[in-house]
Amino acid sequence: NAGVTQTPKFRVLKTGQSMTLLCAQDMNHEYMYWYRQDPGMGLRLIHYSVGEGTTAKGEVPDGYNVSRLKKQNFLLGLESAAPSQTSVYFCASGGQGGKNIQYFGAGTRLSVL
Amino acid sequence: GENVEQHPSTLSVQEGDSAVIKCTYSDSASNYFPWYKQELGKRPQLIIDIRSNVGEKKDQRIAVTLNKTAKHFSLHITETQPEDSAVYFCAASPGSFTLTFGKGTMLLVSP
């Protein structure tokens, strides 16, 4: 039981490049989330999903897209990376048993030059 | 939407002292209040949570109190130890299975 797994762990992009971050969970959770963490800003919700095939916008969705084609996977895409998207990205899952406890992945550190 | 304010941003204590971190929230519909601990370079991990029908909850050296009328909740850590050093985040949920986080408190416990 690995919990929540994020890939890659580190990535460096040039401005304008695209990439996809992958999140996988093996806890059969209905809900999945993508956050970004910046110094002094806490964890800010980018997008989330309440089930397979659904997505919804969070607090800071601009410049990101997501997809949840399978219940266990939640993808975060950056179509044209900008330096302002340099951050640590965390995926989380939860919602089991009607509880909104969230379990986090180890994070992806992204630098956009 | 929900807004969560957290204070202080940094807190330094001596080993054995108590530490208190306070949060306020804006949405009266919020009914779930977790606290997460994040050690340097690690993922956030849930340490304790409280629901709106409870005023206080304890788990060994940590406790959380909730005042719904005033819309604030607090984390209390007693007999602090160096391994308590970390960033602590409070959060509030209006029942939509999303969380709004505070900006975090860096707790430093000196031996």
Image (tube, grey):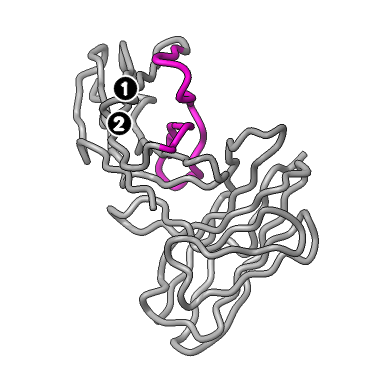
Towards the viewer: A92 or A45: A45
Q: How many marks can you see? A: 2
Image-based side of A40 in relation to B56, left or right: left
The image shows residue A93, relative to residue A82, as above or below, that is above
Q: In the shown orientation, is residue A87 left or right of residue B70?
A: right
Q: Position of residue B89 (x, y in %)?
A: 38, 38
**Residue bounds of the magenta highlight:** B29-58
Question: Where A95 sits versus B73, above or below?
Answer: below
Quadrant, the N terminus of chain A: top right
Residue position for label 1: B67
Visible residue check, residue B48: no
Decide whether residue B35 is among the magenta residues: yes
Q: Nearer the viewer, residue A76 or A100?
A: A100
Where is residue A32 shown, x and y percent of the image?
A: 64, 52
Q: Secondary structure at mark 1?
A: strand
* Amino acid type, label 2: Lys
Q: Can the viewer see residue B83 in this picture?
A: yes
Q: Chain of mark 1?
A: B
For label 1, the crowd category at 10 Å Cα-Cα, with few meaning under 14, some 14 to 19 and many 20 or more, is: some
Circle 2 Cα neighbour tier, 10 Å, few/some/many (<14 / 14–19 / ≥20) = some
| Residue shown at the point (35%, 38%) measured from the top left | B87
In the displayed structure, would residue A25 be above or below residue B61? below
Specify the label residue B71 is tagged with.
2
Q: Position of residue B35 (x, y in %)?
A: 43, 32
Outermost residue to the bottom = A16
Q: CA distance from mark 1 to mark 2?
A: 6 Å
| Residue at point 80%, 61% (across, down) | A70
Please name whichever residue, A16 or B1, is drawn nearer the observer in this view of the structure. Answer: B1
User: Going 70% across and 42% down the picture, which residue do you hit?
Assistant: A3
Numbered disc 2: what chain?
B
Q: Amino acid at mark 1?
A: Asn
Tell me the SS state at disc 2: loop
